[in-house]
């Protein structure tokens, strides 16, 4: 019987939980705001962990790049802190990557909402035109 979760998946999940807390509590840098750790992908040989992050309320690309650099510079410190909490022979090297999928998803969702509202308005306008046109036809024919 095949196992449902591979060891890399379990390690990635544990790292994601721990990193979210460590970044919030231990990294004290004014250039770093609220950080969401979206996902962690651990290589099969456990040498590298790609940590996908987003920054709450941040749209400026320069600030996003700066915050990602701050995290990558703090990677060694965070790795040593992980070694204290996660029982592994070696902790993977951390590589922080800005995750655009959630931002892109929000943009697409906003576009869909906008299209739906425009379609509803268009349908309402069509219904009003039909009802106005029907009333004027009956009103005109009755006055002649």
Image (cartoon, rainbow, N blue to C red):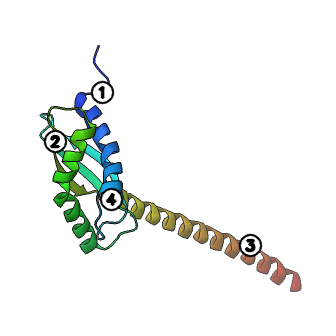
Which SS class for mark 2? loop
Q: Nearer the viewer, mark 1 or mark 2?
A: 2
Residue at (61, 67) in percent of width and height: 123
Q: CA distance from mark 1 to mark 3?
A: 61 Å
In the rendered image, residue 7, in percent from the top left (x then y), is placed at 24, 28
Which SS class for mark 4? strand
Residue at (36, 69) in percent of width and height: 58
User: Circle 4 sits on which residue?
Assistant: 54
Position of 65 with respect to 106 (left or right) is: left
Q: Quadrant of the N terminus?
A: top left
Q: Quadrant of the C terminus?
A: bottom right
User: Circle 2 sits on which residue?
Assistant: 92
User: Circle 3 sits on which residue?
Assistant: 131
User: Circle 1 sits on which residue?
Assistant: 5
Q: CA distance from mark 2 to mark 4?
A: 21 Å
Q: Nearer the viewer, mark 2 or mark 3?
A: 2
Q: Residues within 10 Å of mark 4 (few under 14, many from 20)?
A: many
In the rendered image, residue 36, in percent from the top left (x then y), is placed at 36, 55
Q: CA distance from mark 3 to mark 4?
A: 50 Å
Position of 84 with respect to 140 (left or right) is: left
Position of 144 with respect to 58 (left or right) is: right
Which SS class for mark 3? helix
Q: Is residue 71 above or below residue 130?
A: above
Q: In this view of the protein, which residue sits in the foreground, 86 or 17?
A: 86
Residue at (38, 58) in percent of width and height: 105
């Amino acid at each position: 019987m095949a196992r449902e979760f591979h060891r890399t998946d379990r390690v990635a999940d544990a790292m994601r939980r721990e990193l979210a807390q460590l970044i919030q509590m231990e990294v004290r840098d004014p250039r770093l705001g609220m950080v969401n750790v979206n996902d962690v992908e651990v290589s099969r040989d456990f040498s590298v962990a790609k940590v996908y992050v987003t920054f709450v309320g941040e749209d400026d690309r320069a600030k996003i790049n700066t915050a990602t650099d701050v995290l990558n510079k703090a990677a060694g410190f965070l790795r040593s802190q992980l070694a204290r909490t996660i029982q592994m022979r070696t902790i993977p090297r951390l590589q922080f990557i800005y995750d655009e999928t959630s931002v892109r998803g929000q943009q697409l969702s906003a576009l869909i909402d906008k299209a739906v509202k425009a379609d509803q308005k268009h349908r309402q306008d069509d219904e009003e035109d039909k009802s106005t046109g029907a009333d004027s036809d009956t009103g005109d024919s009755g006055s002649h």
